[in-house]
Image (cartoon, rainbow, N blue to C red):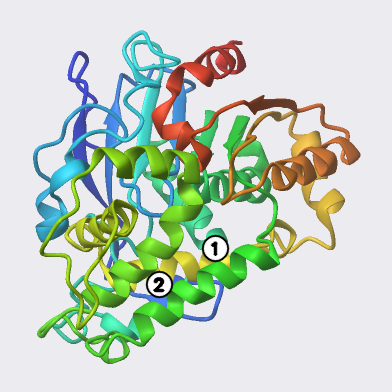
Amino acid sequence: MPPVVPGKPQQTHTFQAVGETEAPLSLREGGTLGSVQLSYQSWGTLNSGKSNAILIFHALSGSQNVTGETPEVPEAGQFWNGEVKDGWWDGLVGPGKAIDTDQYFVVCFNLLGGCYGSTGPSSINPGTGAPYGSTFPHLSISDQASVAGLFLDHLGIERLHAVAGPSVGGLAALTFATNFPDRVKTVISIASGIRTTVLNRLILFEQILAIENDQHFNGGDYYDASHPDIGLALARMISHKTFVHLDAIERRARRDVLQQEDVLSWYQVRDPFQSYMLYQGKKFVQRFDANTYLRIIDMWSRYDAAREGDAENYRDLLTRCTQAGQRFLVFSIDSDFCFYPEEQGELVLELEKAGIEPVHITVHSDRGHDSFLLEPSLYAPHIHYALRD
């Protein structure tokens, strides 16, 4: 591991999880990867006992850049642009903040399958010399947890002070905690759940169809030609209205000027709401890869914590956390249309059945699912308290 430099708030490294001399990384859905790298960032200093580490899993389209400004990540190539350069949780992570980098060693890696430096579909397959594309295997949330375990081994960290994650990152945090119960003390799950609902599966399936039916998708092998930008933009538009409360969309759209160039094949965009959503889709394709999007929403769509942990039921799964003495902080957002509050309620109920007394906080917000990004002050006191010894 490269040395952690005191006083240097941010470091970017590439971790070779599986090398050519080691066995390939076996994935839950049956695929393998012969060579894997994770691009990650860290903040703060790991103490001598390596007991102050906090691992953060990012959400669907997030990155390893949790806080501060990172002008470039060479491994991410063309996708590292625009808003990605600014830390997505800057309001909660940093010196003196709720997740205090003066006190904790905080680390986040770009998910396996990502497009920000970790091995993913746009990466070069060492066996062919070309991007993986359609040959990149299916992933599961438990694969992310397993890779996280290898990553912590690399850092020499046996047990985390805490693991945290919002949205899809919350699914990964829960699965890491249940699959490796002795490796984490406190679990912070924000606007997430214990399984994917039928409604979310259908919304995710719409996004899959949007990308698959783009004329340029070519089964996922598009890197040397036109990319499926229209399909990815449409997928983002479908998802965006679940991330942002409709009242907030209306407020934002009314501030925007209708773009006269917003013309489709024959249809002229006629109001600021359509223009706003089209802008969101166009902006997204500049910083994200369609194949990565498909891999992540696919593993999200199939998520069930008990299945990911090879448990008979949720009580069997969560009893592992009870026996390890884990503590849970669970956040709901009352205006969330992506992970509805009932989903966190189910997680809390199953934790209680397993003998765990989680702290369950309902955040009252009109910002929807994205509240965890936009309103750090609503989360900070509870996270600060949960991290105290």
State the residue in front, 375 or 151: 375
Side (left or right) of 361 relative to 18: right
Amino acid at the residue labelled 2: Leu
Q: Earlier in the sequence, mark 2 or mark 1?
A: 2
Q: Which image quadrant: the N terminus?
A: top left
Give the Cα distance between marks 2 and 1: 10 Å
In the image, residue 177 above or below residue 379 = below
Query: Considering the numbered disc 2 on the image, is that residue within a helix, a strand or a loop?
Result: helix
Whether tag 2 and tag 1 are in contact, CB under 8 A, the answer is no
Quarter location, residue 262: bottom left
What residue appears at the point 15 percent right and 56 percent down from the top-left corner? Answer: 259
Q: Position of residue 30 (x, y in %)?
A: 53, 81
What residue appears at the point 60 percent right and 45 percent down from the top-left corner? Answer: 192
In the image, residue 27 above or below residue 337 = below
Side (left or right) of 153 relative to 79: right
Side (left or right) of 10 relative to 277: left
In the image, residue 202 above or below residue 186 = below
Q: Which residue is mark 2?
A: 294
State the residue in front, 160 or 89: 89
Q: Which image quadrant: the C terminus?
A: top right
Q: Quick check: can you spot residue 330?
A: yes
Q: Position of residue 42 (x, y in %)?
A: 29, 32
State the residue in front, 76 or 337: 337
**Residue located farthest toward the top when viewing the structure as drawn:** 96
Q: Position of residue 227 (x, y in %)?
A: 18, 78
Q: Which residue is mark 1?
A: 300
Amino acid at the residue labelled 1: Trp
What residue appears at the point 35 percent right and 17 percent down from the top-left corner? Answer: 101
Q: Residues within 10 Å of mark 2 (few under 14, many from 20)?
A: many
Q: Position of residue 326 (x, y in %)?
A: 71, 30
Q: Quick check: can you spot residue 21?
A: no
